[in-house]
């Protein structure tokens, strides 16, 4: 059972979120913030934080891979700039580097989409895996 502490707005006594009213003065307590707890029965419908980026990053990788947009979506600014730079400079080399970086983007996009939400969040949000 997760217990959060809330402070009475009236007398500042520390109460637990198990109490609806202050144990000291009886004032109504504000609704406590959601405690960090496993999603439990809602696990099937509630996505872990960051999972919403999976689809966006995956599609951006596949459609706009060479531009590094999917890197920006994930907050990997440096990697995004590198991809974009290679893509643009590649134009001066018959577009071959651009093609290569676009293919990397497609592979990365597919990699994102084939992972489960939990796996995606663990790999790219928590561990900050930059490439693939
Ligand atoms: Zn109170």
Image: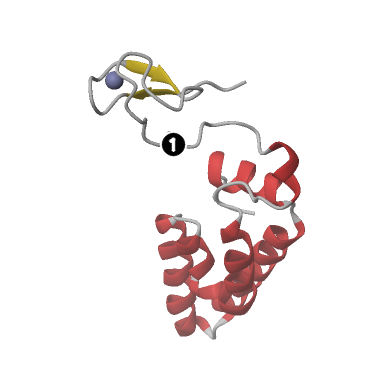
User: What secondary structure is found at the residue carrying circle 1?
Assistant: loop
Q: Nearer the viewer, residue 91 or 75?
A: 75
Question: Image quadrant for the C terminus?
Answer: bottom right
How many marks the image carries: the answer is 1
Q: Nearer the viewer, residue 31 or 81?
A: 31
Image quadrant assignment for residue 101? bottom right
Q: Nearer the viewer, residue 23 or 129?
A: 23
Q: Where is residue 46 drawn, in percent x and y?
A: 66, 50
Question: Image quadrant for the N terminus?
Answer: top right
Query: Mark 1: few, some, or many residues within 10 Å (few <14, many ≥20)?
Result: few
Q: Is residue 54 left or right of residue 26?
A: right
Q: Residue at x 49, y 78 (%)?
A: 90
Image quadrant assignment for residue 81? bottom left
Q: Give the residue at mark 1.
A: 33
Q: Where is residue 18 drawn, in percent x and y?
A: 51, 22
Image quadrant assignment for residue 108? bottom right
Quadrant location of ligand 1?
Answer: top left
Q: Residue at x 71, y 59 (%)?
A: 111
């Amino acid at each position: 059972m997760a217990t959060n502490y809330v402070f009475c707005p009236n007398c500042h006594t520390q109460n637990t979120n198990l109490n609806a009213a202050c144990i000291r003065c009886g004032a109504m307590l504000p609704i406590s913030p959601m405690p960090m707890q496993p999603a439990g029965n809602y696990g099937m419908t509630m996505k872990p934080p960051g999972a919403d980026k999976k689809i966006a990053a995956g599609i951006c990788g596949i459609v706009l891979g060479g531009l590094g947009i999917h890197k920006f979506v994930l907050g990997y600014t440096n990697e995004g700039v590198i991809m974009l730079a290679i893509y643009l400079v590649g134009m001066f080399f018959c577009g071959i580097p651009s093609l290569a970086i676009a293919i990397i983007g497609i592979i990365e996009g597919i990699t994102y989409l084939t992972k489960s939400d939990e796996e995606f969040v663990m790999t790219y949000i928590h561990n900050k895996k930059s490439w693939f």
